[in-house]
Image (cartoon, helix red, strand yellow):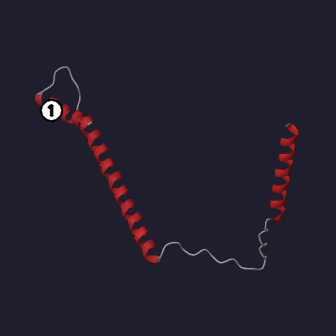
Amino acid sequence: MLKRYSLLALLLAGIATQALAQAPKPAAAKPGAATPAPASAEPPQAQAADDAKRAADEKRTQAKLEREKEAKARREQLLSQCVIQPVMSDEDIAKCRAAYAVN
């Protein structure tokens, strides 16, 4: 039984070797031949639309960062006005409420 499997394995190995030997080999590239430059995948209108979209995204991102920066400055300014003391006036309490409500 073992001999049958060994013979079968050898037979399959021989067939695989023959198939690989007979496989067509790819043609070698000629060193002097110029390869064509890859064509742009997108037409000019698509690139222009892409650029416009990218510019709009950057502008939106910059505006968001600017708003966050202004909000942070406002929070810090409100917190600097709030000084917790043992005895506080209604005005001081209102300032602290506003400052901590923003945070």
Q: Nearer the viewer, residue 75 or 37?
A: 37
Relative height, residue 21 to residue 8 (above, below)? below
Quadrant in which the N terminus is drawn: top right
Residue at image point 75% right, 80% down: 33
In-image side of 84 versus 20 (left or right): left
Q: Toward which corner of the image does residue 86 lie, by quadrant?
A: top left
State the residue in front, 14 or 55. 14
Residue at x-position 84% and y-position 60% = 18
Q: Residue at x 21, y 23 (%)?
A: 85
Question: What residue lies at 86% left-to-right and 37% top-to-bottom?
Answer: 2
| Residue farthest to the bottom, as pictured | 33
- Residue 46 % position (x, y): 43, 72
Residue 87, percent from left and from top:
16, 21
- Viewer-side residue, 99 vs 54: 54
Characterize the local packing of mark 1: few (<14), some (14-19) or many (20 or more) Cα atoms within 10 angstroms: few
Count of marks, rendered view = 1
**Which residue is under mark 1?**
94
Element type at marker 1?
Answer: helix
Residue 95 picture location, percent across and down: 18, 34
Question: Which is more toward the observer, 59 or 82?
Answer: 59
